[in-house]
């Protein structure tokens, strides 16, 4: 299992950090997790052709997490992709996608089936099995349709918080995971509603005990060094993720 950060930033423009987006590779399959603007170019920089993605997963449908969905599907039409593109997202995503189709019409159509949407529960835990990959989800404490996502394959696991405030669901999903990708949009002094602070993430790490934690989605007012130090005080290794950082299961950590 390989996990690559495509975008470690927020919706605010940053020359070094794009909006949220991640790449998961399991064997010959590559999966897109979220996908704000610029994700497709970053995917190519990471050495994966977006034309060959096996599926996409969305933690929620705010623009900074899914803005590249329309360009991706349009690219599939232009490139004449034959295989359908499965998308996994929370209940309600079908309505969101219907709105996109009403706006863009035929430009989102490709092959014989196009995008295939599988909705995940927003009321409790859910699970989906995809080509040797197990996806587990739980509702997040953010906007409607927000989910925490846990990916398991080959004895390894990666958990992505998505956008969320404190969430017992995230504690349960992140328990003993190999890698926790956690948002930290606010500081302890200036919290952002619907998001985590360094102290929140520290409490999460104390309870869930991931092997390591990468912080993402820090707004400019968050002191990254202080945030990392706060989370690391809980014990397990912590760092601030950067675009194109890569983690690989079974390899000795660089730290």
Image (cartoon, grey):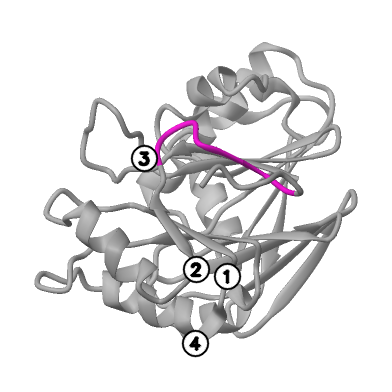
Q: Position of residue 173 (x, y in %)?
A: 62, 76
CB within 8 Å, label 4 to label 1: no
First in sequence, mark 4 or 3: give its number.
Answer: 3
Q: Which residue is mark 4?
A: 168
Nearer to us: label 4 or label 1: 1
- Find out whether residue 92 is within the magenta segment: no
Cα gap from disc 4 to disc 2, whole angstroms: 19 Å
Q: Which residue is mark 1?
A: 210
Q: Position of residue 186 (x, y in %)?
A: 21, 65
Instruction: Look at the image and give the residue range highlighted in magenta.
Output: 242-249
Of the pair 81 and 252, the residue shown nearer to us = 252
Q: Which residue is mark 3?
A: 19
Secondary element type, mark 4:
helix
First in sequence, mark 4 or 2: give its number.
Answer: 4
Numbered label attached to residue 236: 2
Name the residue at 26% across, 62% down.
Answer: 227
């Amino acid at each position: 299992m390989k996990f690559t950060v495509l975008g470690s930033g927020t919706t605010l423009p940053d020359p070094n950090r794009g909006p949220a987006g991640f790449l998961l590779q399991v064997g010959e399959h590559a999966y897109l997790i979220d996908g704000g603007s610029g994700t497709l170019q970053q995917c190519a920089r990471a050495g994966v052709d977006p034309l060959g993605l096996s599926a996409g997963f969305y933690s929620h449908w705010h623009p900074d997490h899914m803005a590249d969905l329309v360009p991706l599907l349009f690219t599939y039409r232009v490139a004449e992709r034959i295989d359908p593109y499965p998308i996994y997202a929370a209940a309600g995503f079908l309505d969101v996608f219907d709105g996109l189709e009403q706006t863009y019409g035929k430009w989102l159509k490709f092959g014989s089936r196009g995008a295939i949407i599988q909705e995940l529960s927003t009321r409790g835990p859910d699970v989906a099995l995809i080509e040797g990959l197990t996806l587990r989800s739980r509702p997040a404490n953010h906007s409607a349709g927000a989910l925490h996502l846990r990916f398991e394959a080959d004895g390894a696991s990666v958990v992505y918080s998505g956008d969320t405030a404190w969430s017992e669901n995230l504690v349960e999903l992140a328990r003993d995971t190999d890698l926790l990708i956690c948002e930290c949009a606010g500081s302890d002094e200036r919290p952002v509603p619907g998001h985590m602070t360094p102290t929140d993430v520290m409490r999460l790490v104390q309870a869930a005990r991931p092997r390591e934690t990468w912080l993402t989605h820090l707004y400019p007012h968050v002191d990254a060094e202080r945030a990392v130090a706060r989370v690391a005080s809980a014990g397990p290794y912590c760092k601030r993720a950067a675009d194109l950082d890569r983690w690989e299961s079974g390899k000795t950590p660089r730290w």
